[in-house]
Amino acid sequence: MTDSELVREIAQPLSGGSNDYDALLGLIDDARFVLIGEATHGTHEFYSERATITKRLIAEKGFSILAMEADWPDSARVHRYVRGLPAVAGATADTNADEALSGFRRFPTWMWRNTVVVEFVEWLRGFNKNIDPKRAPVGFYGMDLYSLHASIDAVLQYLDKADPEAARRARLRYSCFDHFSRKPQEYGYATTVGAIESCEKAVVEQLVELQQKATEFLSRDGEVAAEEFFFAEQNARLVKDAEQYYRAMFRGRASSWNLRDRHMVETLENLVAHLNGSRQPKAIVWAHNSHLGDARATEMSHYGEVNVGQLVRERFGKDAVLIGFTTHHGTVTAASDWGAPAERKNVRPALRGSYEELFHETGLPRFWIDLRGAGQIGVLQQRRIERAIGVIYRPESERLSHYFHARLPEQFDAVIHIDETRAVEPLERTSIWEEGELPETYPFKV
């Protein structure tokens, strides 16, 4: 029997029916953390299938935390919309998901401003409106730490309302960043080369003062005060971690990567602690495979890198389920360089020797594999290359830029393969995206 025939034997086909993921939900069972990845940041099917699984986890298994690879302040606006909460002071309440997602203006906007997320956010709002009062409503939260200045603004906005004198001290501390035109990379470089002193002491002092005032702030308006303080504290913590992250960027990839993923896990743990009531809350995480697959099963570990998947497994063991996605070919929304326009690019057929090629050779268009149950099969356990496309896709350097070695059964508990996929549709569709990329055979037909 060939390798692909062995995989076909254990693959569970997906037909698009309502019972597609019954067995996957059985695998998840009573786990409290479900991490759902993606092999690109711009594939329609990864978003849509992830949303389908998430809806079932919320409706059938009581999950109430959605933690995303997204900025905390922008996600907080979506959170208020799906929870039906008032807008922040001075703003008008959003009336639809498109408006609620309009805070996502930093590159790459299509990660969250796309048609699948709009539909999913509307579903969340509808679910929360009709939820059983005995159940905790579902919240939408960001885990990332790129929002240094937006988080500073949010802390100041909170303190202006809660304690104007404390707001004055916070402005003085945060003015340390004022010389860099809201470009934290410039700040990180300047501190690394010794051109300026770092703002580390100031941002730590600000977080500590906020935490010391917790009792005073929380004594005012009950649950509303607790929620507002938690969001402010998380923003202050984010500023502290982001300051460290932007300095670490110029010391090497492992240092900054580890800071970022540890921040994501700390955010997840803080959410669980904050929302811990009569029943422990259960959390779903959306992020790239590179964050959610266990780093110890990939070559990341050789470079001293850890990730969310590894850290969550170390903390929660079998209470965490890690799910990855793969694709063989199709199209993807991605850019050619950081900050460049979104393009609809062709995803080249997967390279020989990859997991994606192995799955393609099964002849099945869509399927998933229980890697806990079938992971010891040698064909899967064998170390292979695996593809990862982020917000940038450079097919001209495909092997070097987008492949890494992994052992899939150790990386994930389950993997979903969709052989041909299409680009996720941005809400802002530019002419370059509409035109798409010419096929490699143009102008010849094959």
Image (spheres, rainbow, N blue to C red):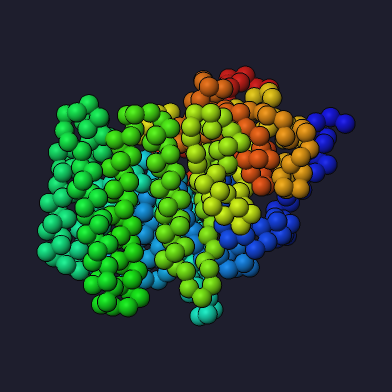
Image quadrant holding the N terminus, namely: top right
Q: Residue at x 66, y 34 (%)?
A: 407
Q: Residue at x 62, y 48 (%)?
A: 323
The residue nearer to you, when weighing 424 against 75, is 75
- The picture places residue 61, in percent across and down from the top left corner, at 62, 67
Q: Residue at x 76, y 40 (%)?
A: 376
Task: Determine whether, in the image, residue 106 is placed left or right of residue 280.
Answer: left
Residue 260 vertical placement versus 128 (above, below): above
- The picture places residue 25, in percent across and down from the top left corner, at 68, 59
Residue 61 vertical placement versus 414 (above, below): below
The residue nearer to you, when weighing 339 against 218, is 218
| Residue 389 can be seen, yes or no | yes
Task: Determine whether, in the image, residue 433 is placed left or right of residue 49.
Answer: left
The number of numbered badges drawn on the structure is: 0
The residue nearer to you, when weighing 236 against 360, is 236
Residue 371 vertical placement versus 385 (above, below): below
- The picture places residue 3, in percent across and down from the top left corner, at 80, 31
Q: Residue furthest bottom?
A: 133
Image quadrant holding the C terminus, namely: top right
| Residue 427 can be seen, yes or no | no
- The picture places residue 41, in percent across and down from the top left corner, at 50, 41
Task: Determine whether, in the image, residue 194 is placed left or right of residue 117.
Answer: left
Q: Residue at x 27, y 67 (%)?
A: 214
